[in-house]
Image (spheres, rainbow, N blue to C red):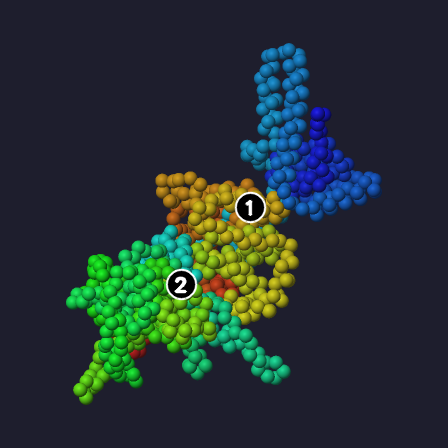
Amino acid sequence: MEKREEKNLGYLGYSFQIKLVKQMIEDTKFSESIIDIMSPNYFDNEYIRLIVASVKDYKDSYETIPTYDTINQIIKSEVRRDIARESALEMVKEVLNSDSKDCLHTQEVAIKFCKQQELKKANQKIQKILDTGDFDRYDECEEILKQALTIGDVTDDGIDVFHAIEDVLSDDFRSPIQTGIVGLDNLMDGGLAKGELGVILAPFGVGKAQPLHSKVLTPNGWTTMGEVKVGDKVISRDGKPTNVVGVYPQGIRPTYKVSFSDGTETLCDKEHLWSVNDINQRNRKTRKNGEIVYLESDNSFKTMKTIDMVDNVKVWGNNRSNYRIPIIKAVEFTKRDLIIDPYVLGVILGDGCITETNHPHFVTKDDEIINEVKNYYNKLTVTEQVREVEVEEDGELVLVTRYLKKVSFLGLKDDLRKLKLYGTNSQTKFIPEDYIYSSVEDRVKLLQGLVDTDGSIDSHRIEVTTVSEVMSKQIREIVLSLGGNCNISDKIPTYNYNGEKKEGKRAYRVGFSFPDDIDFNPCRLIRKLEKFNGRTKYKSNKFISSIEYYGEEDSQCIMVDNPEHLYVTDDFIVTHNTTLVTRMANTAYNLGYNVVQIFFEDNPKVIQRKHITCWTEIPLNELTENREKVKEILPRFKSKSGNLILKKMASDGTTIPQIRQYLRKLTSNGMKPDVVFVDYIDCISPTKQFKDEWSGEGNVMRQFETMISELDIVGWTAIQGNRSSIGANVVQADMIGGSIKKGQIGHFIVSIAKTLEQKEEGRATMAILKSRFGKDGVIFEDILFDNGTLVIDTNDSSDVSFLDFEKGTKKKDANFITDVINKNRATSGGGMT
């Protein structure tokens, strides 16, 4: 085979050479690592050779890599022949317009080629020395080989103070990228530049809180908000388990009781987020040719705060409920080992007798039920009976004669004793916990046994009557866990005895319904099943009936890792679970930069909607109803020269090397990031084990700083404050949650504080805690900070120092006390109280 010796890059193709020159001009770090060993003669096109020679000469003269404009000026002034000059200028344009796809591969191949050429040269030098037979020059040969092997490797031996003076003195030596927040940009001299690390510090878990005693549903049943830990599993709206990725204590918070049309209720703070569908969505109409035209209902859900719904719970003359919330799907609890089949137990609890004075049995007129029971338990004896049975008619109990069958269970006492059911009567019966929180199949079978024996069906409404208050609530629990609506009413029936009107036992009527798309039957008895129709209108027919102030409660919020960020709280109510980061990312994209926004806890659609709000100025909760306007506006921003990539990563186990690999992949595919936002750094795992969590946090931040320097990009990240940051007038550096090293490593730190009053008004206090390249110790008090519209504006707020802010706060407190004293005097007629 003929030996192939590549003396130039021609064997890699014309396109490769164009891409390589582009990298030499645009990637300064790569260019500096290869420029000294890259010879123009390695290229087989004369105009490419001319460009490379210009780059090398300029670097030798000015110690910096020339821009495209500078190269054009060099060519215009130094190339005399018109044809050659025009051809060279066209070549510069072709390099500029070529894509950057596979740029990392291009760089790696080029470095290997150059090293190979250097090794060849070194080999020739060494061979000449060896040919002389002068073995005393061995050390010289070894040094030649070492130099050849290290050529092209990036080393940092420090820089001479006079290095690249032109770059140092240029107006854009930092080339900052603006944040879009005027006060910040002014203090940062235009924003952060590449290689610089910005940190956003804010109180953790702002808003969305519930009291610690609020119930939260898990795959094994209920726990409380205060007991939930990161890593636990809770139930989301789809009925499936989801991971808890964040737990954020909130301190003492004003709490509201939210009640619903089916009698369920829960507690939450005023900032808590709900997924709701309002009456205007369900009753859409427009005017066409002077007439009202009714449109198809919009049954989608939007996100609203508790406080924003308080005054609009009832509308249209206070007669109609405004807000409807979603109903959960059947909850997928962990299956439990059940000693009695659930259908059989449902029959026993519905129409059975398990008092100690009787053998366990039930009475029925339906052979279907007996046959169903035999499928699971065949140790039965059946005897026929004639009985007078109480039947309710027009609110009174009437005795009727029935031909019934008594079905006795043999050998079931011990199992009933284990369940603590044997010996209970109709008023003390209950459903064992294992049956309430077992699999969907088990809960359906139990409900079928109850409805077959003690239930009635009228279209979509099903009703089970019991004199056990405990069991009535447990049946409701099962219905709600299967995605149904349920309410309980009670009454004391009356009956005539020997001409005298008497009262019966208080009866609890459990009424419920299911949507028509459930994949199970609520009963098995054919005569009842034929009457059943699932709900078709307003399948999620659960409305907020009232929102009332409840009091002050120690509260907490959680973040769950499911697309909707919804979890299930008291009574199977579905509840909801990055404004500054998104605002900054949006600004950078609008300026034409390549932006990557990495997040761990938010739903990508939520982040998309926030960016849409930035562009359209339409509030988040009004985007859906303004979708046509949104579609009209968005194309104007889609055509920007930069890119905006949203990337959700795992909230458990993601490391900085994984993020670096992802960013390098983007670069290799032609999209080199200019700025990366990580929301937030606390979600990133260290790459090795540390003796304590704080050391790991410092290591992660240091890795992040190194990464943005290596990739030559701007880096922004958010970190959480500690408990003392909640409700603080100003969030200060000592309020950083976890390791203080996160603050020490950051080049620029801005904090955001929100008092309860500011949250209500959409305002905040912003403080500059640290700046390596500008003024720090500055506070912007009471700036506009609206989470709904993503507007952040410092224009109406003057900046003050920490000392002046503290003096102002003390003065306000003093004025407040004076006002209270004066009001007291006025109330008491001038005297003190």
Q: x and y percent of residue 545 in the render?
A: 38, 75
CA gap, disc 2 and disc 1: 41 Å
Q: x and y percent of residue 381 in the render?
A: 24, 65
Q: Which residue, as the protein is rendered here, is positioned at the far bottom?
A: 499
Rendered view: 364 above or below 121 = below
Task: Give me the residue at 32% from left, 56% from top.
Answer: 336
Query: Pointer 2 and pointer 1: residues touching (CB < 8 Å)?
Result: no
For residue 487, which quarter of the picture?
bottom left
Rendered view: 149 above or below 108 = above
The residue type indicated by label 1 comes to Leu
Q: x and y percent of residue 358 in the render?
A: 18, 67
The crowding category of the residue bearing disc 2, from other C-alpha atoms within 10 Å (few below 14, some 14 to 19, many at least 20), is many
Q: Which residue, as the protein is rendered here, is positioned at the far right?
A: 82
Q: Which residue, as the protein is rendered here, is positioned at the far left?
A: 357
Residue named by callout 2: 330
The residue type indicated by label 2 comes to Ala
Task: Give me the residue at 64% from left, 23% from top.
Answer: 122
Task: Give me the residue at 61% from left, 66% from top.
Answer: 631
Task: Give me the residue at 42% from left, 39% from top.
Answer: 688
Q: Nearer the viewer, residue 88 or 308?
A: 308
Residue named by callout 1: 663
Q: Would residue 348 be visible to someone looking at this image?
A: yes
Instruction: Give the left or right position of residue 642, taking residue 316 as reference.
Output: right
Q: x and y percent of residue 49 in the render?
A: 74, 36
Q: Quadrant of the N terminus?
A: top right
Q: Quadrant of the C terminus?
A: bottom left
Local SS, label 1:
helix
For residue 644, which quarter of the picture?
bottom right
Q: Of callouts 2 and 1, which one flags the residue occurring earlier in the amino acid sequence?
A: 2
